[in-house]
Amino acid sequence: MVECESPSDHPAALNRFVDLLGDVAPSFARVKTFPGGRFGRHVVCEFDLFGKKKQGQILALGHSDTVWPVGTLASMPFRQKDGRLWGPGVLDMKAGIAFFIYAMRILRDLETPVAHKVVMQINSDEEVGSESSRALTEKNAKRSQFVLVLEPGTGLDGKLKTARKGIGDYAVIVRGKAAHSGLDFNAGASAVLELARQIGKIAGFTDLRRGITVNPGVISGGTRVNVVAAEARAEVDMRVPRLKDAAALDRKFRALRPVDKRCTIEVAGGLNRPPLERSPAVVQLFRKAQTLARDLGVTLDESSVGGGSDGNFTAALGVPTLDGLGAVGEGAHAPNESILVDRIADRTALLAKLVATL
């Protein structure tokens, strides 16, 4: 899987991975694919497991896309060294997909009865916002009693994720009036200068005590050094731990007003991935996993993280969602991306035990 490179922006590569997934899926799995628009296809895999009439559904969530361009294997080859497996996408998150497939094989081989229908959905656009897969994710989540997210655990302890921040993107566009900076300076209204004033306000929306961060990350504006800028733009990332925080921030963005009244401000965007909040249902599911891990001789802790996953969508629907059940390692999106070999067995066993006992 790691050697089948699959960056988000390469549909053909993603579809090759989808074909590979169909080849390695066990014979007792029914594999369907769904169009991904400008991305690769999405996959839904339903496992035929032992047990009487199934009551409800367990949804396992993963993604096929990575942040690594095709050709990265030349500098980051898949290899085993120093007790780890290395390579682009091995941690985030092809190992988690492999673990779940083998966990279902374990249950089938042991003829273990399972009370729920078990479905694994693999999306092709998670790393770039889940634009085309969100509707499919939410549709399958609404049919499910539990969602298990195959993203990697937190840190080298492999903590599970019981909370994730919601993520939003804003574009703040300032329009002023162009003029020659030498011949007619006073006739101009600088959009760049106005945006600089606004950036200070926007950065002030950050509230670290409440876990809210607002980052003006990309700034552009102006055409030439001798022209008073007619337009400038800021791309802003926001992260919120609670849904109510997003609504309050949105009001602040919409309330931005120019200091120079000759300028105008346009605000676009908003929350695109709701937070995964640590609800009682999420905690109950984590406690279940913690007990099962203890039976395996593993101490399991929980964590709250700033990054999002497709589990954010399912948790926002009120479906108990447990994230971070994939590999244990480090270096996601970094050259040292790797997983610990000696944590493969217990993570795979935990997935099998969860599915069997829920």
Image (cartoon, grey):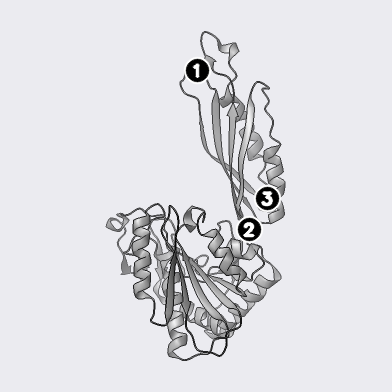
Q: Which quarter of the figure has residue 80?
A: bottom left
From this view, report whether residue 48 is shown above or below residue 330.
Answer: below
From this view, report whether residue 247 is shown above or below residue 111.
Answer: above
Q: Which quarter of the figure has residue 305?
A: bottom right
The x and y percentages for residue 237 are 57, 45
- Of residues 35 and 245, the one drawn nearer to the viewer in this rendering: 35
Q: Residue at x 58, y 77 (%)?
A: 57
* SS under mark 1: strand
How far separated are the C-alphas under marks 3 and 1? 37 Å
Circles 2, 3 touching at the beta carbon (< 8 Å): yes
Amino acid at pointer 1: Val
From this view, report whether residue 82 is shown above or below residue 208.
Answer: below
Q: Residue at x 69, y 38 (%)?
A: 254
Q: Residues within 10 Å of mark 1 (few under 14, many from 20)?
A: some
Regarding residue 157, the answer to whether it shows in the image is: no
Q: Residue at x 46, y 80 (%)?
A: 103
The x and y percentages for residue 130 are 51, 56
Q: Tell which residue pokes out farthest to the top in this image.
A: 183
From this view, report whether residue 179 is shown above or below residue 171.
Answer: above
Regarding residue 50, the answer to whether it shows in the image is: yes
Identify the mark at residue 264; answer none if there is no mark: none
* SS under mark 3: helix
Left or right relative to 217: residue 264: right
How far separated are the C-alphas under marks 2 and 3? 9 Å
Q: In which quadrant will I find the N terminus?
A: bottom left
Residue beneath disc 1: 227
Residue beneath disc 3: 246
Q: Residues within 10 Å of mark 3 (few under 14, many from 20)?
A: many
Residue beneath disc 2: 275
Circles 3, 1 touching at the beta carbon (< 8 Å): no
Q: Earlier in the sequence, mark 2 or mark 1?
A: 1
